[in-house]
Amino acid sequence: MEQVSRSQTDDLIQTAQRYACEIVSGVVTPYEGGRKIWRECKLNLEKGDHRLDPFVYWSSEFEETSDPERRAVCERALRHAADLLISNGTAL
């Protein structure tokens, strides 16, 4: 993967923040929004940029379980990550 410019990185984080707003406002489910952030933003950030990692972890956890309680935990964690991303520019 080629190096990502500062401008491209800023655009990806802003896009992720828009998706996070959709999660928080209920426009999309936490999983749907988390998966968008993972696939459309995180995968395009420079290697070593971990600001969006919680979306990868919790979205993949959601995909891997059929247990309703575990899925509820994943959705709460994704909403929390979205709140952090909106407020701080990072989900960590």
Image (tube, rainbow, N blue to C red):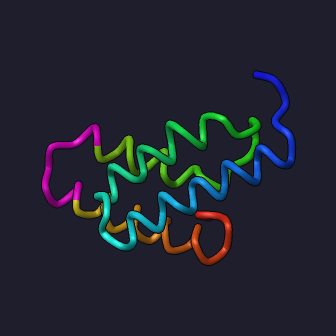
Considering the image in quadrants, where does the N terminus appear? top right
Query: What is the magenta range?
Result: 63-71
Can you give x and y, in whole percent of width and height, for residue 77 in the image?
39, 65
Residue sticking out furthest to the top: 1
Q: Is residue 8 left or right of residue 64?
A: right
Q: Residue at x 31, y 63 (%)?
A: 27
Q: Tell me the quarter of the picture where residue 5 sits.
A: top right
**Depth check, front residue: 19 or 55:** 19
Q: Tell me the quarter of the picture where residue 74 sits.
A: bottom left
Q: Residue at x 57, y 62 (%)?
A: 17
Can you give x and y, in whole percent of width and height, for residue 2 in the image?
81, 24
Can you give x and y, in whole percent of width and height, for residue 65 in the image?
22, 42
Q: Residue at x 38, y 64 (%)?
A: 23
Q: Is residue 11 above or below residue 2?
A: below
Most common SS among magenta residues:
helix
Can you give x and y, in whole percent of width and height, for residue 66 in the image?
15, 43
**Depth check, front residue: 54 or 8:** 8
Residue sticking out furthest to the bottom: 87
Q: Is residue 23 above or below residue 39?
A: below
Q: Is residue 75 left or right of residue 52?
A: left
